[in-house]
Amino acid sequence: MATHKSAEKRARQTKRRTAVNGARRSRVRGSIKKVEEAIAAGDKKAALAALRGGASLVIAKNAAARRVSRLNARIKAMA
């Protein structure tokens, strides 16, 4: 348990950031799932729309670029 004022503040901040990061991670996973489902269904238009909607979510820059690139390549391969 935190006993210093600064440690108590850090504990509050950590709790808040954990909740925000969890929600963000859930949105990213959900958007990737929508793209995957559209690709599996063979619906290129829906896959592109889902990719554009989910690509703007803020996560680590390199990880996001890698995931978007791989999904985009799979969508292009559908044609």
Image (cartoon, rainbow, N blue to C red):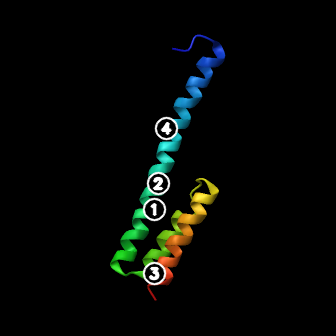
Local packing at callout 4 (Cα closer than 10 Å; few below 14, some 14-19, many 20+) is few
Residue that mark 3 sits on: 45
Rendered residue at 62%/21% (across/down): 9
Residue identified by numbered label 4: 19
Q: Residues within 10 Å of mark 3 (few under 14, many from 20)?
A: few
Q: Quick one: label 2, few (<14), some, or many (20+) residues within 10 Å? A: some
What's the amino acid at mark 4? Answer: Ala
Q: Which residue is mark 2?
A: 27
Q: Earlier in the sequence, mark 3 or mark 1?
A: 1
- Residue with the mark numbered 1: 31
Give the secondary structure at mark 3. Answer: helix
Circle nearer the N terminus (3, 2): 2
- Give above or below for 30 relative to 18: below
- Amino acid carrying label 2: it is Arg
Secondary structure of the residue carrying numbered label 4: helix
How far apart are the two marked residues, 3 and 2, measured between alpha carbons?
21 Å
Q: Secondary structure at mark 2?
A: helix
Q: CA distance from mark 3 to mark 1?
A: 15 Å
Q: Residue at x 36, y 70 (%)?
A: 37
52 or 66, which lies in front?
66
